[in-house]
Amino acid sequence: MFRRTLAFCCLMSAPLLSFEAAAAPRVPEILTDNGITYCTNASGFSFNPQTADAGTSMNVVTEQVYNKLFEIKDHSAMLNPALALSYSIAADGKSILINLRKGVKFHHTSWFTPTRDFNAEDVVFSLNRVLGHDTYLPTLNETDVNYSNPQYRIFHEQAKKVHFPYFDSIRLNRKIKAVTAINPYQVKIDLFEPDASILSHLASQYAVIFSQEYAYQLSADDNLTQLDTHPVGTGPYQVKDYVYNQYVRLIRNEDYWKKEARIQNIVVDLSADRSGRLIKFFNDECQLASYPEVSQLGLLRNKDERYYLKSADGMNLAYLAFNFQKPLMRDKAIRQAISQSLNRWRIVKNIYHNTASVANNIIPNVSWASSINTPDFAFDYNPDEAKQKLQDKQLTLNLWVMNEEQVFNPSPIKMAELIKWDLAQAGVQVNVRSVTRTFLIEQLRNNAEDYDLILTGWLAGNLDPDGFMRPILSCGTKNEITNLSNWCDDRFDQIMDKAIATNHLYERSKAYNQAQELILDELPIIPLANVKRLLVANGKVQGVEMTPFGSINFATLHFTAKEKK
């Protein structure tokens, strides 16, 4: 049976751990030798990006452990090959042939020793898993299974519950018909219809490639859940230790197929909040700190050689959504007036402290499709007109807000109170309710989401507008966690389908602009802000490059010449 001694405190045992309400613990110094400590957020942490909640911030660990078929090149629609060497699209647009890289090795760990290199079977397995297609793991489909140990039944049941939110939100199983290994280093993807967004989805942060051999070994041991908790990939680093909600230790993959990483050890510290991370940074307990408390960034504004701030325009949007299941919210005039009551400049100034811009469009400016962006937002702040339309209606609205910090909203409760105040000036009473993500999902599942408005947002894993707009506004995602407006308009879906039917970027951009204009006219959501991705770095650490998704490549990090460890 699959039983190995691991340094993991795995998720199954997490409830057994307890921590005192004190200062965030210090990572043991022995783990930081010849290394860098990166302080980040533990919220929603997972070793499997495929199963991560769609629209939430991806953690940096998996981006070092796994590779994808493609990487996104700069801020364009172009793709860089990764595990894929090249690709070709059939004349009818209904199939894609992908040639794979040879000589790529999976991680050797204390719990898994691969017997072969990466090949087409790994791609077929990884894609078929998120598509819900047969992956030749029969134990997941069997209802009557005999277990040598009762604990294995728990593993089995947990494995059956695995979902893939991002791929569900874009309806990937309605785009891809089949994935086939033509030979060990060639994969064919058959589509139901031509779809220009597919390759971008395969370059997203969610589309990592797993070892089929590892999955088969785990399945044989009735332990498939460990595929999602004990990662084995092909990336520049591999997991050495994990202490639940405290830290992950990564060590350099000496067999990496690209240029070897320069830093031997990376410790990802998960123990501190935004303010705590900045404190740890100033105490030199971490050399990199992501998503720092923006109200404290003034401490970094003096030119100081000891540190620097890296930022990148983000592929994200904070917005206020109307619940179209409520008859009142289906009144377009009321939606327009509510939009006109919101002082979005004041909201952005008070919440983001100059680390975000007011969003006048749905598609962020960093996307290649924004070149044809709608220039103005017709229902911008106009308090006098809003008051005239709303003050006599005696409206009382329920505003829900998730009680968790996100990249697109570092202070959700405070933002909700600012919105409440703005609407009060227009004669609208607002009841703010803070809810957990778990509670919200449960309410959606039971079709019991009793809000008129909800404060939310979206993060994209690529620059393609299809994966940005379709999950949050299409008919196919109505009543799901991604489409919190419960809006459905066939015109929108038709325009979006038109956009993916061609590979011509200008024609796609025009179609997405049409979809955007429809949204800004019908107003199922009010765009609020586009947020920059931020990172504070020690001045001795070089090679830090951020993407619009907030990710960095640890393999490029190095110390200044005199600071080598």
Image: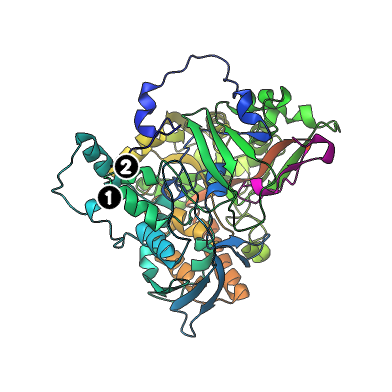
What label does residue 276 carry, if any? none
The stretch in magenta equals 541-565
State which quadrant residue 415 falls in: top right
Q: For the C terminus, which image quadrant?
A: top right
Task: Pinpoint residue 166: horizontal percent, then vertical percent.
Answer: 44, 53
- Magenta span dominant secondary structure: loop
Q: Are marks 1 and 2 in contact (CB under 8 Å)?
A: yes
Q: Residues within 10 Å of mark 1 (few under 14, many from 20)?
A: some
Q: 558 or 386: which is nearer to us?
A: 558
Residue labelled with disc 2: 2
313 left or right of 168?
A: right
Residue at 36% across / 66% down in the picture?
Answer: 174
Q: Is residue 201 magenta?
A: no
Task: Pinpoint residue 414: horizontal percent, then vertical percent.
Answer: 56, 29
Tell me how far mark 1 sits from mark 2, CA to CA.
8 Å
Q: Secondary structure at mark 1?
A: helix
Task: Pinpoint residue 342: horizontal percent, then vertical percent.
Answer: 59, 40
